[in-house]
Image: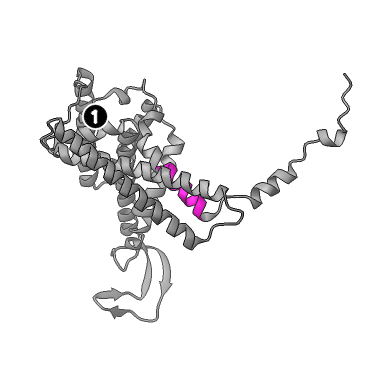
Amino acid sequence: MRNNIPSYLLEINNSYPNKFEKKSGLSFIEKSIKSISNSIKSIYLQADFAVKKSFIYTIHPHIKVLSLLYIAVIISISNNIKDQLTLTVFIIILYFISKLNILHVYKKIFFISFIFGFLIILPASLNIITKGEIWFTILTRDSPYHFWIYHIPKEIGITKEGCNVVIRFFLRVFNSVSFAFLIIYTTPFPKLIKSFKIIGIPDTFLLILSLTFTYIIILAKTIEDAYFALKSRMMRNIKNKKIRMFIADRIFFIFKKSRSNYENTYLAMVSKGYTGKIKLFSFQKIKKSDIISLFIIILLGLYTVLI
C-alpha cells in the first residue's frame, strides 16, 4: 500500500519539544518535594540497589557496626595527612569490591565533605587563627590592631600550618562519611537497626527508630502523590501559601489517621498478651569470614596509627 502521509508530517523537529520542556519544567517547590521524597526513599532502600553478590554485602551487620566505630576512632586520632590518605585509598578499594556506583555515591560524599569539612574550617588557614609561615598574602594593612580577644596582624594571609589543618580536617570528614556511606549502602536498613544492639541500645528504642523512619517514608511519598494529584486538577499554578497549607493539612491528616491505627493495633496486641517487652532477633550467624574481615580492619587501623 502506498504511503499517503505528507512528507512534512514525517519530519522530526527537535526544536519544539525542547522549548516546551523548558517552559513546562517543574517549579522550585515541585523539584524540592520530589528531590526530598526521592532522597528519603533512596536512603531507606539503599541496600536494594547494592549488588547482593558482593563480599561486603554478606558480612554480618554486627561486624559492620563494630568496624564503623573502630574506623571512626582511628580517623579521629590520626593526625598525619599520610595516614588519612592511606585510609582514603583503603575505603576506595572497599567501594570497588562492593561493586557500588562509585561516581554516584562520591558525588554525595564530596558535597557533604565540602560543606562540613572544608567551608567550615577554611578560616583556620589564615594566620589570624593558625600562626605560622605565610604562604599566600591576601591583605596588607597599615598597622595591626586588636578586635575583642583577637589580634589582627598587619599582614593577613594563608599559612602552611593552616593549610595542613584544613586538609587534615577535610580528610577526616571525607573518610568518615565515605565509610559510613559504604556501611549504609551495603546493609539493609532493618538489619542495620538491629545491629546497634551490640553497643547496648535497647530494643524498644530501635523499634521506635525503625517505625519513625518508616513513617517519614510514608509521609514523604503521600505528600508527593497528593501534591501532584492536586496540581493535575488545577488550571493555574499553585501559590506558595496554598502549598504550605496543603502540606500542613496532609501532615495533620496522616498523623491523625496513623495515630488511630496505632492505637487500635496496640489494643489488639494487648488483647493477644503483649506486655510491653520487645526483643529483636537476628537470624544471621557470624561466620569465619566475618571474623577475618574484622581482623583485617583492626590490623589496618593499627598500621595507620602506629607505623
Report the amino acid beneath label 1: Pro
Tell me residue 195's x, y (percent).
20, 32
Q: Which residue is mark 1?
A: 61
- The N terminus lies in quadrant: top right
Tell me residue 123's x, y (percent).
35, 63
Tell me residue 246's x, y (percent).
44, 55
Task: Give the residue displayed 14% in from the left and 35% down from the top.
Answer: 270
Q: Is residue 230 visible?
A: yes
Whether residue 253 appears in magenta in the rendering, the answer is: no
Q: Nearer the viewer, residue 31 or 1?
A: 1
Q: Is residue 66 visible?
A: no
Task: Give the residue displayed 40% in from the left and 51% down from the top.
Answer: 250
Q: Nearer the viewer, residue 54 or 134?
A: 54
Q: Nearer the viewer, residue 62 or 119?
A: 62
Task: Give the residue displayed 63% in from the left and 50% down from the top.
Answer: 24
Number of other residues with Cα within 10 Å of mark 1, as a class: few under 14, some 14 to 19, many 20 or more:
many
Q: Which residues fall within the magenta stretch?
A: 29-39
Q: Quadrant of residue 139?
A: bottom left
In the displayed structure, 163 sits above or below 131; it is: above
Q: Quadrant of residue 272?
A: top left
